[in-house]
Structure formats: C-alpha cells, structure tokens
Image: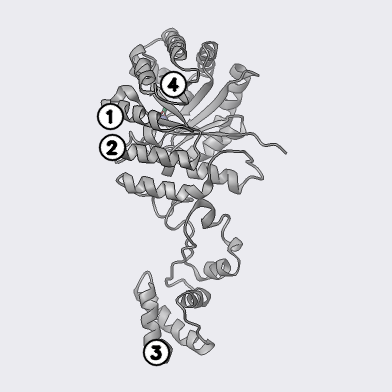
C-alpha cells in the first residue's frame, strides 16, 4: 500500500519565537535551524523579516546557510512586507514567501478596517507580487476558522488564480473542533482545490488544547502540510506540537499512515536543545518529550514494564531519542523495580535480603518522595554490611 506524504512546516522560529519567553538571538536561531534541518522538517519558517532588523538578519543568515530544507519568510499583503521577505530569502537554495491576511468579519471590521472587496484585492496583489520573486508562494487566511466559508473560499480562489501553491487554513485563536475543522478542510478541497496541484495546509493554536487533534483531523480530511512547533511553543497556549503530530502518525500508523521526513529519534534531542535556549522547558507530563513521559512509578506498572515494556508503553523511549527508560523509585514502587535497580548497581540480593531491604525501602519512601541510588546503597549498608564489603 502506498501512503501519501505530509510535509512538516516548522514555525518554531517564527510563531514560536514571537511568544513570551521564547525570543532567541541570531546564533541561537541558526543553531536551532541546523537542528531542525537535521530533524528532517520540510519547510522551516525562519521569521517575519518586516517585523524587525533582527528578524530580517535571522532569516537572511538561515537562508544563506540551510541547503536542504526550504526556508519560508512571513509577510503581510503589503508591497513592503513582501519585498523585505524576498530580500531576506535571496541566498536561499529553496525558498517560499508566506503571505497572509485575515478573512473573518471580526478581524476585517476591528483590526484591518477593510471591506471584503478590499481583502480580495489585497490577496490578489500580494500573491501576484510574491510570485515575481519566488515560485513557491503560500497564502494564509488568518482566522479562517471564524470566517464566512463562502468568503473564505472566494479569497482562496483568488490566491490560487494568482499562483499560490499552498493554501493555509489557520485556526488562529484555537477555537475550532476536530469534526468542524475536518469539514472545513473538505469544503476547501472540494470548492477551491479540486484536481489542481495545490496543497492544503493546517496551522492550529492550542487555546482549547485541541491543536494536535485538529491538525490530525485536517490531515485525515485531505490536508497535506502541517504547521507546528517543537515543544508546541507559540502564541498564547502555543501551536500544535511537532513531536506529538509525528508520533501519532508513527504509533497509530494503522489509522494515520503517512510518509514524512522526520527522524523520530531526533525529536527528544531537538526538544532539549530548544528548552536549553529559551527560558522554559516542557511540563514534566508533556507527551513524547516530558521528563515523565516514559517514567513509571506505580509498582504494578514497574513490574509490567520490566517484564515486557509493551504492557504500558505504546512506543519506546529510544524511538524518540530519550536515552533510556526512566523508572522513578518512590513509595509506589514494587519489589521488582527495586531488585532491577540493585542489579543495575551491581548487587544480587537473595530472597531474604530482598524482604528486609524492601521493608526499609518502603519506610524511607514514606518520608522521602524520590529514592536515589545513594539511598539504595545506604539501605543496603544498614541491612547487609557483608554484602557491601564484598
Ligand atoms: O495563527 C495564525 O493565523 C498565523 C498566521 C500568520 C499563519 O500565525
Ligand atoms: Zn499562528
């Protein structure tokens, strides 16, 4: 069975970087860009060149350095934005201008103060101008999920007429639901794309915690580009998390079988690199890359995992690049986990010794949340001085 490909459009350095606590300097952005290429993203949105001199320089430097991955630069629909994006991309081997304008009535009335006719005109001019600079132009309808569907399709049709190759349907405020988003993607596919060589892209924010679910619903409905960020960083509650989107496709290939270029064993190192650059890490229970994502504390789980990891693990830590299974010893840990850890430390305990050490271990675990190797060695010393001397 041949499976279709989804393209991963990473916006860690644009939508991610523009959120609080995530700003990066030039050398940090270049370091991250190299890692994202190594990870295998197809398109890397390097910044918003008109936004600042720093953004312009970062896009320029990344475009000059990265040779495999396509580099995208963001631009509103103005001439100045588009020419600035084109200038920053001049040295890129593969480039894309990503131009956007809002299409929802609320944005038109209160933010842009424009009519629908004006938005259609702005779209036409922007895509036409961008096509003078680069072959690959992506058009985004900001706040698409709160836009009037007929108008949204009209705008997209204009973008396609002018040569846009990618139509992005952002859920800018993280408002949509999986079934609703899926229907919207199907509508755009039927009414705008048809059999044209145009890719539908999705870009979901996580305000209701649905960014990944919405992105995947859209993929199931025909979208073939997913915009996402490492660790899910991004405006407000963030963007769809790259590692979660990819691992759903890997673990649930039975239902979501898509080819992609991401090397999953590089997910965790990439996540770690980002955390070391920005001012916060991921929550401990974050899926895929959180500190506890593969840690089992409850005794019954530890026994199961030690007997056969498949009892509680749907993917291995190694598959996402986590060094090894991180079992935390604590008051819920059972004898099996304790014996296993002593074995790893080089001690074989007989049944009596296990019984005695386990009693002391549970007494200590009642007082102390996490038990470290030093504690285990101390327990052994109290209990069986002969063993320690051996
Ligand atoms: O969330 C959004 O709508 C965006 C666009 C610029 C694509 O980030
Ligand atoms: Zn966004």
Judged from the image, the secondary structure of the residue bearing numbered disc 2 is loop
Looking at the image, the residue that sits furthest to the right is 1
* Mark 4 surroundings: few (<14), some (14-19) or many (≥20) residues within 10 A: many
What mark, if any, has residue 25 been given in the picture?
A: 2
Residue depicted at x 56% and y 59%: 313
Residue corresponding to mark 1: 54
- x and y percentages locating residue 60 in the rendered image: 35, 27
- x and y percentages locating residue 261 in the rendered image: 55, 39
Front position in the image: 193 or 98: 98
Residue depicted at x 62% and y 18%: 196
**Real-space CA distance between mark 2 and mark 3, rounded to the nearest whole angstrom:** 54 Å
Total residue callouts: 4
Inspect this view and state whether residue 84 appears.
Answer: yes
Residue corresponding to mark 3: 389
Q: Is residue 223 above or below residue 108?
A: below
**Real-space CA distance between mark 1 and mark 2, rounded to the nearest whole angstrom:** 8 Å
* Mark 2 surroundings: few (<14), some (14-19) or many (≥20) residues within 10 A: few
Nearest to N terminus: mark 1 or mark 4: 1
Looking at the image, the residue that sits furthest to the bottom is 386
Front position in the image: 87 or 140: 87
Judged from the image, the secondary structure of the residue bearing numbered disc 1 is helix
Q: Which image quadrant for residue 373?
A: bottom left
Nearest to N terminus: mark 4 or mark 2: 2
Nearest to N terminus: mark 2 or mark 3: 2
What mark, if any, has residue 97 been given in the picture?
A: 4
Q: Which image quadrant for residue 2?
A: top right
**Real-space CA distance between mark 3 and mark 4, rounded to the nearest whole angstrom:** 69 Å
Front position in the image: 164 or 366: 164
Do labels 1 and 2 touch, CB within 8 Å?
yes
Asked whether mark 2 and ligand 1 are closer than 8 Å, the reply comes as no
């Amino acid at each position: 069975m041949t499976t279709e490909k989804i393209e991963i459009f990473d916006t860690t350095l644009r939508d991610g970087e523009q959120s609080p606590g995530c700003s990066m300097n030039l050398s940090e952005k270049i370091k991250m860009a190299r890692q994202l290429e190594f990870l295998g993203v197809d398109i890397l949105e390097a910044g918003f060149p008109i936004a600042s001199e720093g953004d312009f320089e970062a896009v320029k430097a990344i475009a000059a350095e990265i040779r495999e991955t396509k580099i995208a630069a963001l631009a509103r629909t103005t001439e100045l934005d588009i020419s600035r994006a084109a200038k920053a991309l001049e040295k890129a081997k593969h480039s894309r201008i990503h131009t956007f304008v809002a299409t929802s009535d609320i944005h038109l009335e209160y933010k842009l103060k424009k009519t629908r006719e004006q938005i259609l005109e702005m779209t036409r001019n922007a895509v036409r101008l961008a096509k003078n600079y680069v072959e690959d132009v992506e058009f985004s309808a900001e706040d698409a999920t709160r836009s009037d569907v007929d108008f949204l399709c009209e705008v997209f049709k204009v973008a396609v007429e002018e040569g846009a190759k990618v139509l992005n349907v952002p859920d800018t405020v993280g408002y949509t639901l999986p079934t609703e988003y899926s229907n919207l993607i199907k509508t755009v596919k039927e009414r705008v794309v048809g059999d044209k060589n145009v890719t539908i892209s999705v870009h979901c924010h996580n305000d209701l915690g649905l960014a990944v679910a919405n992105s995947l619903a859209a993929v199931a409905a025909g979208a073939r580009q997913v915009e996402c960020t490492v660790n899910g960083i991004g405006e407000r509650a963030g963007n769809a998390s790259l590692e979660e989107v990819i691992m759903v496709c890997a673990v649930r290939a039975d239902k979501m079988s898509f080819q992609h270029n991401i090397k999953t064993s590089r997910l965790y190192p990439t996540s770690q690199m980002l955390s070391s650059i920005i001012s916060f890490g991921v929550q401990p229970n974050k899926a895929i890359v959180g500190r506890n994502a593969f840690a089992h504390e409850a005794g019954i789980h530890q026994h199961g995992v030690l007997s056969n990891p498949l009892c509680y693990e749907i993917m291995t830590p190694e598959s996402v690049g986590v060094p090894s299974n991180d079992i935390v010893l604590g008051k819920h840990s059972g004898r099996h986990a304790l014996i296993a850890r002593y074995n790893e430390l080089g001690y074989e305990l007989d049944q009596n010794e296990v019984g005695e050490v386990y009693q002391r271990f549970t007494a200590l675990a009642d007082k102390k949340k996490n038990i470290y190797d030093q504690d285990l060695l101390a327990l052994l010393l109290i209990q069986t001085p002969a063993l320690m001397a051996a």
